[in-house]
């Protein structure tokens, strides 16, 4: 299996990255050959090649930005002897370099993602220091920053100098939803690749082929998520996710009066809090016990911490609290995304459009709401959902923002 196999519906991007990996491979091979001959090997020079030291992967949610970055990182570290053969190319998917990169254990590949609301200056400085190191054993030092849009302004300025003046064999791979989500000074120094939303057929195919999902279910969740690979896989494999989505899609039928609007808003907030609680139960207890053990506390929750270690425990608790806030926001935003898709389907029926409906299984409900309102009402409802998402981004109290939205959905 080649490293590009999981990059769904991105043929153009795959072709560009594969070509760049070939040039990168040739550069490093030339340096290593010079060293073997006892020559003073110059740093790899990427000027004039299809390879560069900084890349920016952008695309809508679910398009596979992080998947593309990881696949490229694996291709850069590929050590298969077949890569040098005609038609071969780096990125075999089987060699030690490819495998360890894809599973996240390669010593020269740092993959950074965050469960928090932002990436700060301290974390970014640590990355920059790492980026100055020579590869320990691989062909390149690769930093994959999956959430470049979450860099604070200060962190972005720290990263800028590293991107401007990279170490000779260091490659930065940044991922963000759009170019506008990254500081102009950083994106101007990166080679940009824009991914598109894959077709529902392509997503369904990969779910069947790679995850063993039944074709009928794969097609249904691919349509429901409109090509979002990660959400489609979760819906296909997690019954709780399907139940939560079904509950969200009942909301348009429950906003007939003020009481129904307020109750529906509270239930959305409660569902997001429950998601955050589930994450905490799975992760927080394990993290806390591991830290207590590392600090020298006795096993179990009753062990007393040594003096001077309370600060480390408080830092972990603060991190867990921020992660809980992020999880609640992400869960709520997903619900709002699903509501937007629902009303988009309503609008498609009202206008007689032939676009594929994300919620084709609920066609009767869609028709009921479509026949009871006009297209301009549906557009105002979609705008109300967008306004709620913007309010949440501005840190408006979630319950107030969602209540305002449900009242607007009622008014149409």
Image (cartoon, rainbow, N blue to C red):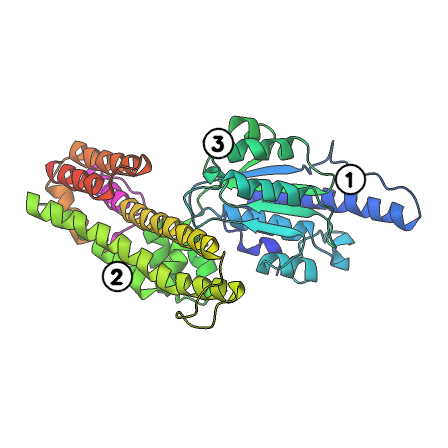
Taking depth in this image into account, of 236 and 270 the one nearest to the observer is 270
Judge whether residue 346 is colored magenta.
yes
Count of marks overlaid on the render: 3
Q: Secondary structure at mark 3?
A: helix
Measured along the vertical axis of the image, is residue 387 above or below residue 144? above
> Which percent across, then down, holds residue 345?
25, 44
> Which percent across, then down, holds residue 160?
59, 31
Nearer the camera: disc 2 or disc 3: 3
Q: Which residue is mark 2?
A: 243
Q: Secondary structure at mark 2?
A: helix
Q: Is residue 379 left or right of residue 89?
A: left
> Which percent across, then down, holds residue 6?
53, 55
Q: Residue at x 52, y 48 (%)?
A: 66
Please report contact status of discs 2 and 3: CB closer than 8 Å, yes or no: no
The rendered magenta stretch, by its main secondary structure, is classed as helix
Taking depth in this image into account, of 148 and 337 the one nearest to the observer is 148
Q: Residue at x 33, y 61 (%)?
A: 278
Q: Give the residues in magenta.
A: 339-360
Judge whether residue 227 is colored magenta.
no
Disc 3 crowd rating (10 Å Cα; few below 14, some 14-19, many 20+) is some
Q: Which residue is mark 3?
A: 153
């Amino acid at each position: 299996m080649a490293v590009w196999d999981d990059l769904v519906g991105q043929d153009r991007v795959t072709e560009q990255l594969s070509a760049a990996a070939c040039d990168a491979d040739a550069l490093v091979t030339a340096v290593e050959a010079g060293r073997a001959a006892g020559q003073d090997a110059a740093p790899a020079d990427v000027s004039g090649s299809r390879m560069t030291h900084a890349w920016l992967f952008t695309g809508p949610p679910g398009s596979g930005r992080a998947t593309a970055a990881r696949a490229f990182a694996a291709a850069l570290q590929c050590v298969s002897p077949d890569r040098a053969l005609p038609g071969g190319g780096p990125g075999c998917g089987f060699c030690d370099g490819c495998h360890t990169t894809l599973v996240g254990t390669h010593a020269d590949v740092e993959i950074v993602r965050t469960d928090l609301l932002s990436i700060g200056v301290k974390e970014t400085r640590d990355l920059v220091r790492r980026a100055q190191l020579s590869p320990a054993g691989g062909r390149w030092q690769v930093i994959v920053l999956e959430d470049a849009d979450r860099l604070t302004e200060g962190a972005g300025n720290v990263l800028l100098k590293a991107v401007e003046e990279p170490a000779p064999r260091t490659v930065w791979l940044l991922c963000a939803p759009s170019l506008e989500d990254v500081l102009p000074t950083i994106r101007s120094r990166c080679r940009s690749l824009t991914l598109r939303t894959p077709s529902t057929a392509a997503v369904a195919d990969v779910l069947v082929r790679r995850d063993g999902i039944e074709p009928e279910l794969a097609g249904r969740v691919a349509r429901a998520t409109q090509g979002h690979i990660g959400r489609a896989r979760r819906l296909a494999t997690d019954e709780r996710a399907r139940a939560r989505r079904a509950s969200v899609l009942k909301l348009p039928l429950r906003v007939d009066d003020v009481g129904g609007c307020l109750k529906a808003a509270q239930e959305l907030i409660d569902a997001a809090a429950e998601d955050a609680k589930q994450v905490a139960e799975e992760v927080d207890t394990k993290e806390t016990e591991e830290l207590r053990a590392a600090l020298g506390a006795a096993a179990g929750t009753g062990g007393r911490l040594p003096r001077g270690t309370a600060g480390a425990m408080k830092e972990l608790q603060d991190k867990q609290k921020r992660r809980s806030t992020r999880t609640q926001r992400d869960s709520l935003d997903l619900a709002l995304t699903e509501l937007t898709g629902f009303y988009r389907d309503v609008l498609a029926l009202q206008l007689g459009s032939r676009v594929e409906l994300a919620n084709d299984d609920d066609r009767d409900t869609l028709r009921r709401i479509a026949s009871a309102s006009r297209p301009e009402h549906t557009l105002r409802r979609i705008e109300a959902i967008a306004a709620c998402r913007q309010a949440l981004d501005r840190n408006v109290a979630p319950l107030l923002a969602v209540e305002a939205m449900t009242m607007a959905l009622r008014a149409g």
